Image: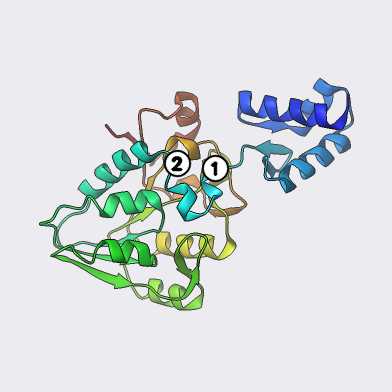
Amino acid sequence: MLTEQRQLAILEDLQRSGRVLAREQAERLGVSEDTIRRDLRELSSRGALQRVHGGALPVSPALANLARRSDIAVDEKRQLGRHAASLVADGQLVFVDGGTSALAMVMQLPATLRATVATHSPVIAAALIEHPTVEVLMLGGRLFKHSGVAVGAAVAEAVQALRADCFFLGVTGVEAQFGLSTGDAEEARVKALLMASAAETVLMASSDKLGKVSPYRIAPLSALSTLLVTPQADAAQLQALQRPGLEIVTVA
């Protein structure tokens, strides 16, 4: 079997099963594990999959830049945002992540809500300019243009000076073993700090992110309080994500 044929077979199996193991692929395709590992490295370098210990997982489409992500799962993000917005109560201080799901959330906050939103996203802050009774705290630093959020030491210092009631988190991947992940190391660090500085964390996860991984781990699933998903979510993937203490809510 030619290299291209073998790699195509690996990708087809990955699409079917959601995970491939080097050992199993070597047996299935009649080659050595070293050959399969080379294939996985090459496919990973092309962005076709995400390598993990012993094999590979699907790469998240949410690794695209902010402009491209705005066209992915639009209806799902609106559903998730509507439910997330309903969870914010008067008098609360909440952290809101950057990203398209978070933007859908803040645009649906009730006009009468009296709360404080702290965010490291200028896009999220700008969306709240016209809200009459929501105070906005900007957590500034170096702008990571790919995701439209601030990162770095200044953000970390600002986050650690606050204690939020809730953090509304966005990720590019959520997977049973690897946990919560994103595509940039500094961005992952900021998200982890926001989680640590909040009483609870709510993740808004459109179906394209379930079972996917990105290169940088934010936290394990056990650090998450609530996972919001839509009816489009795959039942088997949700079953794999079940954990004691994690509430999975399917929003309408």
At horizontal 70% and vertical 43% (from top left) the residue drawn is 51
Decide: is 15 above or below 153: above
Mark 1 — residue? 61
| Of 172 and 225, the residue lying toward us | 172
| Of 45 and 163, the residue lying toward us | 45
Picture coordinates of residue 157, whole percent (x, y)? 43, 77
Instruction: Give the structural element (helix, strand or loop) at label 2.
Output: loop
Lateral position of residue 138 relative to residue 64, left or right: left
Quadrant position of residue 228: top left
Q: Residues within 10 Å of mark 1 (few under 14, many from 20)?
A: some
Picture coordinates of residue 218, whole percent (x, y)? 52, 55
Q: Residues within 10 Å of mark 2 (few under 14, many from 20)?
A: some
Q: Is residue 222 visible?
A: yes
Check the picture and name the quadrant holding the N terminus: top right
Q: Are marks 2 and 1 in contact (CB under 8 Å)?
A: yes
Lateral position of residue 176 relative to residue 83, left or right: right
| Of 69 and 180, the residue lying toward us | 69
Decide: is 178 above or below 122: above
Q: CA distance from mark 2 to mark 1?
A: 8 Å
Residue sticking out furthest to the left: 112
Mark 2 — residue? 72
First along the sequence among labels 2 and 1: 1
Q: Amino acid at mark 2?
A: Ile
Picture coordinates of residue 248, whole percent (x, y)? 36, 36
Decide: is 235 above or below 55: above
At horizontal 33% and vertical 72% (from top left) the residue drawn is 138
Instruction: Give the structural element (helix, strand or loop) at label 1.
Output: helix
Q: Amino acid at mark 1?
A: Pro
